[in-house]
Amino acid sequence: MNASRGNWSSSFGFVLAAAGSAIGLGNIWRFPYTVGQYGGGAFVLVYLAFVALIGVPVLYAELSVGRSTQRSAVGAFKELVPDTWWPAVGGLGVLCGFGILSFYAVIAGLTLSYVYMAVLGRFTGGGLTGEQSAQVFSELTSNPVATVTLTGAFLLLTAWVVRGGIQGGIERAARILMPIFFGILLLLVMRAVTLDGAGEGLRFLFAFDFSKLTAAAIVSALGQALFSMSLGMGAMITYGSYLGRDENLPKAGITVAIFDTGLAMIAGLMIFPTLAYAGAEPTGGPPLIFIVMATIFDTMPLGSFFAVAFYGLLAIAALTSTISLLEVIVAYFVDERSWSRKKAVWSVTAACFALAVPSALSLGAVDFFTQMAGGQGFLGLANIVFGNYFLSIGAVFICLFVGWKWGVSSAVAEMNRGGQLFGAPLWGVLVRFVCPVAVLIVLVYAALTNSYL
Ligand code: TRP
């Protein structure tokens, strides 16, 4: 094992960093608006089923590959099956991370601006009507200088942390940011569930109206499960590669899964009661948490405090996720190309910024980028290509690799080094058959019906 590549100080350090990766805009931004779009409880139920039957097995597959080889997403395959085409699966993952980071950083950049506006008190002291709030949002997103600068700033922040290495950069950031994150979240949830009308919001989250469960909803629930747990592109191979050989991998893995899923639910507990309190519709789509939430703070006591806390929470969640996306790519150049960490971090960040610019300009600033791909825009297209297709394809290959090539017994032996995988035979069946088949069906269906579009 190559000691100079770094490692987590303990499995607790790993859990914090991996939970930081998993918990992100996917939980607080994407999950609530997709639940809103697909009508609430029934979608949530399908999502939970996918997490248990597909997310957790794939998570274990990735972590065991990573820890057993102690290499990056590409190197891991090279180590286990040299001279085959399998490392290309890792390569696809690195590319996918690059693509996701490029659009994720744009939304993350917007959160910085909302923190700033919240600090200036723009959402309180008279408040904003729905229309005014929509206008604040579109003024921001159609300003090319603002969106490009904010994206660049967020990438720089990410690069600065990743530059510090595994323990000194990524783990340290997680140790500082995650407790702050949980503290703020607790406060916001307590505020939300004690608002008038909270019950109605909760009913929306938990009411099972199966008539709303369209095929598109099911496709979306699977994409959401993979995205939210940071699966399908080798992020967990990479994070697993820094985990010590004697640490309890099954326990660390399930802890991360529980944190991530619990957090999506808690984000729901925070958002839906707040929407119900303000009489706002939960079906607002992607700008939900920016446009709708911004109108709400003025109506509650200590609103300006909660506004800063809410957007700060989003920014922190996004940062610990962009860190993991960047680390996957950096680890590849460090391990496979022998670049110094510093060189890898700055070159990858610069290249990613270049790909992020059209996304940053596609929220209204430049018509060409805004309207392309049938109105999805460049960012929407990047989200579909990388965030849906690449991730699902990657997940299928990782399952096929672990289930049929490397072998379930090798993976289970790896996981059982410092712990005990509960239900190992079941896990074997899930990675060999259930996961690849289910993901493939959803993928083909989505491609044929353009459900992602
Ligand atoms: N899981 C993160 C979120 O929910 C996003 C993310 C970070 C991610 N790293 C990833 C998604 C790797 C897919 C793959 O916001």
Image: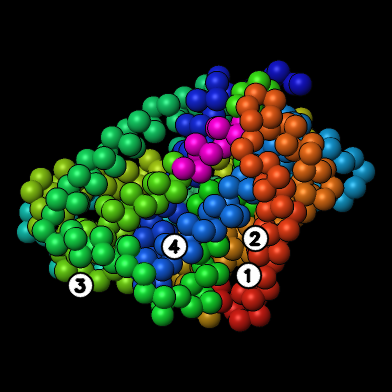
Q: Which residue is mark 4?
A: 45
Q: Ligand 1: does it lie within 8 Å of the C-beta at label 2?
A: no
- Residue 452, compared with residue 449, is above or below; it is above
* Picture quadrant of residue 30: bottom left
First in residue order: circle 4 vs circle 2: 4
First in residue order: circle 3 vs circle 2: 3
Residue 289 seen in the current view:
yes
Depth check, mark 4 against mark 3: the one in front is 4
Q: CA distance from mark 2 to mark 1?
A: 9 Å
First in residue order: circle 4 vs circle 1: 4
Q: Residue at x 72, y 41 (%)?
A: 73
Q: Residue pushed farthest right?
A: 83
* Picture quadrant of residue 317: top left
Residue density around tag 4, few if under 14, some if 14–19, many if 20 or more, within 10 Å: some
First in residue order: circle 2 vs circle 1: 2
Q: Residue at x 54, y 58 (%)?
A: 50
Depth check, mark 3 against mark 2: the one in front is 2
Q: Amino acid at mark 2?
A: Ser
Q: Which residue is mark 2?
A: 392
Q: Which residue is mark 3?
A: 131
Q: Considering the numbered disc 1 on the image, is that residue within a helix, a strand or a loop?
A: helix
Q: CA distance from mark 3 to mark 2?
A: 37 Å
Q: Amino acid at mark 1?
A: Val
Query: What span is colored magenta in the figure?
Result: 249-258
Q: Quadrant of the N terminus?
A: top right
Q: Ligand 1: does it lie within 8 Å of the C-beta at label 4?
A: no
Q: Position of residue 24 (x, y in %)?
A: 44, 47
Q: Amino acid at mark 4?
A: Leu
| Tag 2–tag 1 contact (CB < 8 Å) | yes
- Residue 268, compared with residue 16, is above or below; it is below
Q: Which residue is mark 1?
A: 442
